[in-house]
Image: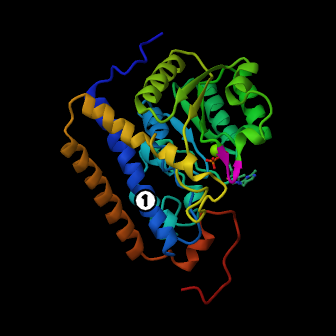
Amino acid sequence: MPDRSHNIDPDRLLGLYKTMRRIRAFEEAAEAASLDGRVGGAVHLSIGQEAVAAGVCANLRPTDQITTTHRGHGHCIAKGTDPGAMMLELFGKEGGTCGGKGGSMHIADFDVGMLGANGVVAAGIPIAVGAAHGAKLLGEDRVVVCFFGDGAINRGPFLEGLNWAGIFALPILFVCEHNSYASTTRTEAVTAGPGATARAESLGIEAFEVDGNDVVAVDGLAGELTGRIRAGGGPFFVTARTYRLKGHTSVDPGAYRDEDEVSLQWAEDPMNRCEEELQRLGLAAAELETIGRQATEEMAAVAAAATAAPHPALIQAFTDVQDVGAPVWSALP
Ligand SMILES: Cc1ncc(C[n+]2csc(CCOP(=O)(O)OP(=O)(O)O)c2C)c(N)n1
Ligand SMILES: [Mg+2]
């Protein structure tokens, strides 16, 4: 078993930190744009969960693939999707990852192996399993990572997907991002038995638990498991314990949670924990501040560009969708 202690190369940890800061800055910019109405409707923020996205995706190649959920901005950024195109998508603007038609919950970017966010809980699981089965049939050495929440384990596709992956020994890593909530409900109140890890094990899938706010631990475990998949192993399952520091959506004040619970969890903010680790390795606080400022500036520029960008021409409503025949709306510009 490889060493999973905190012996990490400082440069690697710095790279993980930069990814986490970019995700946090993107989420803060998206939150502001949702609250002031530039983005129509609410968005699901991954603030507090950045270490899972960064730690797992740091072990993936451009040809590897992921699926994600309604809370998928962090996974997209960590996999290499351009935040500028993502922000345009959130704003419903021209140049968005899906032409501005999908929005936050339907970002997809096949060029970097990002097979799609998904507004339907657990619906990404069979898609990821299908992609992994495709890799196996084609003899390609792709690894597929399937991100989903702790609420998703109570839906049927979870059982179907894990069963199929187990039967066919597929090259897939399931990552259950366990933030303890499904919307306004504590998941333990609606989950029978010991939970995600045990359910995977009951299907014969080797499963692990990791502190999802510890990016070094996530990176180490993901490195080990993706390595074993590339060597012909898999599937594997990881439950990453983390916490959703914000409400379920950008407009949810989260009144169903105890204030003490939330403030205790802010003390476990993965960003601070990563900074402490970097300082222990000799990085200066000023250097970390510069990285944070650069990330904020990058995402402020991205949001400003999305604010100024045009909406797609109305005729675009008829492209890239199902065959609707020739549009007859002659008034279209
Ligand atoms: C099939 C389905 N049922 C219900 C919903 C409404 N819904 C949206 S997000 C969510 C909670 C999901 O919880 P979890 O999987 O833990 O993800 P998290 O929001 O915590 O990231 C629910 C119930 C949905 N989108 N799809
Ligand atoms: Mg959850």
Residue at 77 percent of width and 32 percent of height: 159
Give the quadrant of residue 126. top right
What residue occupies the far top of the structure in this picture? 1
Left or right: where 96 falls relative to 273: right
Q: Which residue is mark 1?
A: 28
What residue occupies the far bottom of the structure in this picture? 331
Left or right: where 305 falls relative to 47: left
Residue 67: in sight, yes or no?
yes
Instruction: Identify residue type, mark 1.
Output: Glu
Q: Colour mode? A: rainbow
Residue at 67 percent of width and 75 percent of height: 326
Give the quadrant of residue 288. top left
Residue 82: in sight, yes or no?
no
Disc count in the image?
A: 1
Seen from the viewer's position, the closer of residues 281 and 135 is 281
Say whether mark 1 is within 8 Å of ligand 1: no
Residue at 25 percent of width and 34 percent of height: 279
Give the quadrant of residue 135. top right
93 up-or-down from 1: above or below: below
- The picture places residue 137, in percent across and down from the top left corner, at 64, 26
- The picture places residue 197, in percent across and down from the top left corner, at 67, 26
- The picture places residue 87, in percent across and down from the top left corner, at 45, 62
- The picture places residue 250, in percent across and down from the top left corner, at 55, 62
Q: Is residue 89 magenta?
A: no
Write the start and end of the magenta stretch as one range.
181-185
Seen from the viewer's position, the closer of residues 121 and 310 is 121
Say few, some or many: other residues with alpha carbon within 10 Å of mark 1 (under 14 / 14 to 19 / 20 or more): some
139 up-or-down from 86: above or below: above
Left or right: where 41 falls relative to 30: right
Seen from the viewer's position, the closer of residues 315 and 32 is 32
